[in-house]
Amino acid sequence: MHIHTVFFWLWKTTGPEQIRQFETGLDLLTRDPNVLERQIGKPATTSRAVIDNSYDYGVVLKFSDLASHDAYQAGEAHQLFLETCANLWSKVQVYDIENDA
């Protein structure tokens, strides 16, 4: 199992129309046929010193293996998302996990 976790910080000047564009882009992106499970959300309201909730959106995607993840990365949906939405974020951070489950 390959778990792909991505956090996005949008530009502070991002308006409602651009946010809708970003949310639509995330929805389409995460419906790629290589994705087994998907979670999209905003930071939880938890508050502890070890929690970073400074991001605007987080995405967690599960793939059967690294090859499926790599196919997703090269796929049309991912490329379209980058072309249409990359200008909306000031920072992106990715954490990938390999799991034997």
Image: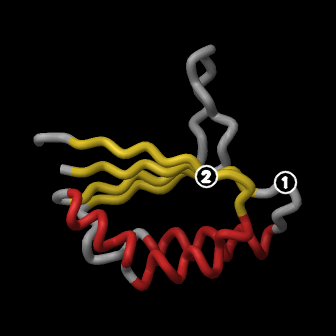
Residue 92 higher or lower than 50, as above or below: below
Q: Is residue 17 depicted above or below 5 in this figure?
A: below
Residue found 57% across the figure and 74% down from its top: 82
Q: Relative to 29, is 89 on the left or the right?
A: right
Which circle's residue, 1 or 2, is located before the other in the chain?
1
Q: Do the residues labelled 1 and 2 touch (CB within 8 Å)?
A: no
Residue 34 pos. (x, y %): 25, 71
* Circle 2 SS class: strand
Residue at the location (36% across, 45% down)?
96
Could you tell me which secondary element the residue under label 1 belongs to? loop
Q: What residue type is labelled 1?
A: Lys
Counting labels gives 2
Is 17 left or right of 91, judged from the image as shown?
right
Q: Residues within 10 Å of mark 2 (few under 14, many from 20)?
A: some
- Quadrant occupied by the C terminus: top left
Question: What residue do we see at 37% from left, 52% from top?
Answer: 4
- Residue found at x 49% / y 79%: 79
The residue lying toward the viewer, choosing from 56 and 82, is 82
- Left or right of 64? Residue 47 is right
Describe the colour scheme in one phrase.
secondary structure
* Viewer-nearest residue: 60 or 43: 60
Residue occupied by mark 2: 92
What's the mark number on residue 12? 1
The amino acid type of the residue labelled 2 equals Val
